[in-house]
Image (cartoon, helix red, strand yellow):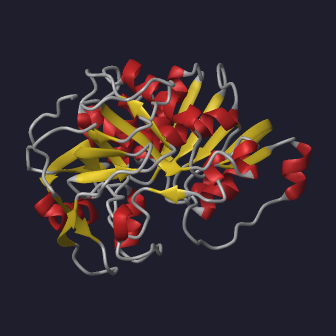
C-alpha cells in the first residue's frame, strides 16, 4: 500500500570523502520488497559520530548518506506489512522512529539476547549509498526501512526535535542503565555533558538515584546539566584529581583518563559502564587488585536492543516537559544547507543541530 502523488525521485546529501563537502544527489524511489517501508524524513539531527566520520576520525564505507537520528512519516508499506515494536501493524501516515541497527534475529548472537551485535548487522547512516538500498541515512528526503527493522510509533505530542535523538543517544543510555541495574538510592557519576551525558543525568534522576554527579570541562554544559537534574557538577582540568566513591559510573566522553578515574573511585560493588569509547584511543592503565577487591564490574555498551528503544520512547514521552530536551537543538537547516549545518556543528559545538527537508509532499492517505 502506498500514498498517491509521491515523487519518483529523492534528494540526499552524500558523503564521499573526509574533508570534502557533501554532494546533493538524486536517487530513484525504490520499489519495496516484502516487509519493507518507505519513510518520508521529517527531521534528522547530526550526531557526534557523524561529525567524527566527516572529519576522518572514524572510517565508514563510501559513498554513504550519513545521519541516523531520524523522525519520519511512512508513505509506503509492502506486504506483509511490518509491525511496530509493540507487535501492531504499521500504517501509512504513522510518524515513526526506528532502531539504528537491523538485526537478523536468527544468528547465535541474536538468539542469545544480543541482537545489537548480530553477525549480519546493518546500520542506518553507516551503509553504502548504492543500489536499491541506497537510501539508508537521514540526510535525505526519504529512507528505505529494511525488513526486520525495529520500528516504533511516536506520540503526537513529542516534537520532532525532541524525538529525533531517541533512537541513538536516548536508547544507548537506556541500554547503559539496563546493564547498570537498579540505581535507586545510588550515587551515580557521569563523565561527559553532551547528548549522552545530559540524557544520562535525567534518566538517572528519574530512576531514583540519590546523587547524580556529572563531570565535564565545559562550564556552560555543566550549568545546563543542572537543569537536567544533576545534583552535583564537577569542572576539572585533570580528572585524575576527582575523588569518590560512586556506585554507578557512566563514561560517556570516551576519555581514557576518565576510564582510569572511574575504576579508581568506584565503591565496593560499583558498576562502570563504558559508552563513549567508540574510536581508537591510547590504552588505559587499571589496577586489577582494586577491581578484584572491590567486586567492581566493567561493562561496555555499543548499540542497543529493541527493549532499549521502547524504554527510551517511554522515558522521553513522560519527561520531555520536565527537562529542556527541546532546547538541545540549536538550529535547524534545510537539506540543501547540509554543509552549513555541519560547519555550524563543528565551529559552535552545540549539543545538536537539525536538518529538515524543505519539500512538502502531499500527506499520505491509506488506500
Between residues 23 and 165, which one lies in front from this camera angle?
A: 23
**Residue 322 x, y percent position in the rendering:** 34, 20
**243 shown above or below 28:** above
The structure residue drawn at horizontal position 58% and vertical position 55%, both measured from the top left corner, is 239
- On the rendered image, what quadrant is the C terminus found in? top left
Query: Which of 261 and 114 lies nearest the eye of the viewer?
Result: 114
Work out whether residue 134 or residue 208 is closer to the camera in this orientation and state it.
134
Asked whether residue 2 appears in the rendered view, the answer is yes
Q: At which x and y percent is residue 306?
A: 56, 36
Residue occupying image coordinates x 71% and y 52%: 107
Percent x, y for residue 195? Answer: 40, 45
Total numbered labels placed on residues in the image: 0
Tell me residue 178's x, y (percent): 64, 33
Compared across the picture, whether 329 is left or right of 97 comes to left
Depth order, front residue of 222/148: 148
Residue 324 sits above or below residue 148 on the image: above
Q: Residue at x 40, y 51 (%)?
A: 33
Q: Is residue 364 left or right of residue 90?
A: left
Above-or-below relation of 154 to 138 = above
Can you tell which quarter of the image residue 113 is in? Answer: top right
Image quarter of the N terminus: top left
User: What is the quadrant of residue 185 in the picture?
Assistant: top right
Q: Is residue 231 visible?
A: no
Amino acid at each position: 500500500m502506498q500514498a498517491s502523488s509521491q515523487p519518483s525521485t529523492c534528494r540526499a546529501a552524500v558523503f564521499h570523502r573526509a574533508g570534502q563537502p557533501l554532494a546533493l544527489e538524486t536517487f530513484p524511489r525504490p520499489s519495496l520488497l516484502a516487509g519493507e517501508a518507505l519513510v518520508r524524513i521529517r527531521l534528522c539531527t547530526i550526531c557526534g559520530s557523524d561529525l567524527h566520520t566527516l572529519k576522518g576520525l572514524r572510517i565508514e564505507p563510501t559513498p554513504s548518506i550519513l545521519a541516523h537520528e531520524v523522525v519520519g512519516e511512512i508513505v509506503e508499506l509492502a506486504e506483509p506489512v511490518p509491525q511496530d515494536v509493540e507487535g501492531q501493524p504499521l500504517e501509512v501516515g504513522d510518524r515513526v522512529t526506528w532502531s539504528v541497527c537491523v538485526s537478523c534475529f536468527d544468528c547465535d548472537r541474536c538468539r542469545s539476547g544480543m541482537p545489537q551485535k548480530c553477525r549480519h548487522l546493518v546500520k542506518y547512516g553507516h551503509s553504502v549509498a548504492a543500489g536499491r538500498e541506497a537510501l539508508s541515512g537521514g540526510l535525505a528526503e526519504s529512507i528505505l526501512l529494511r525488513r526486520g527493522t525495529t520500528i516504533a510509533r511516536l506520540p503526537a505530542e513529542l516534537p520532532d526535535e525532541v524525538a529525533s535523538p531517541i533512537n541513538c543517544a536516548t536508547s544507548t543510555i537506556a541500554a547503559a542503565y539496563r546493564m547498570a541495574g537498579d540505581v535507586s538510592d545510588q550515587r551515580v557519576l557521569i563523565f561527559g555533558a553532551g547528548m549522552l551525558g545530559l540524557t544520562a543525568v535525567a534518566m538517572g534522576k528519574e530512576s531514583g538515584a540519590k546523587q547524580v554527579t556529572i563531570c565535564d570541562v565545559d562550564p556552560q554544559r555543566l550549568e545546563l546539566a543542572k537543569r537536567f537534574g544533576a545534583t552535583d557538577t564537577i569542572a576539572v582540568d585533570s580528572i585524575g584529581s576527582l575523588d569518590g566513591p560512586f556506585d554507578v559510573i557512566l563514561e560517556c566522553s570516551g576519555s581514557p583518563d576518565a576510564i582510569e578515574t572511574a575504576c579508581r573511585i568506584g565503591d565496593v560493588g560499583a558498576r562502570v559502564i563504558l559508552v563513549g569509547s567508540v574510536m581508537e584511543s591510547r590504552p588505559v592503565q587499571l589496577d586489577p587488585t582494586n577491581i578484584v577487591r572491590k567486586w567492581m564490574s566493567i561493562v561496555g555498551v555499543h548499540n542497543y536492543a529493541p527493549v532499549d528503544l521502547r524504554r527510551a520512547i517511554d522515558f522521553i514521552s513522560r519527561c520531555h516537559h520536565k527537562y529542556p530536551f527541546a532546547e538541545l537543538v540549536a538550529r535547524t537547516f534545510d537539506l540543501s544547507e547540509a554543509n552549513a549545518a555541519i560547519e555550524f556543528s563543528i565551529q559552535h559545538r552545540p549539543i545538536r543541530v537539525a536538518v529538515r527537508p524543505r519539500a512538502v509532499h502531499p500527506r499520505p492517505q491509506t488506500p
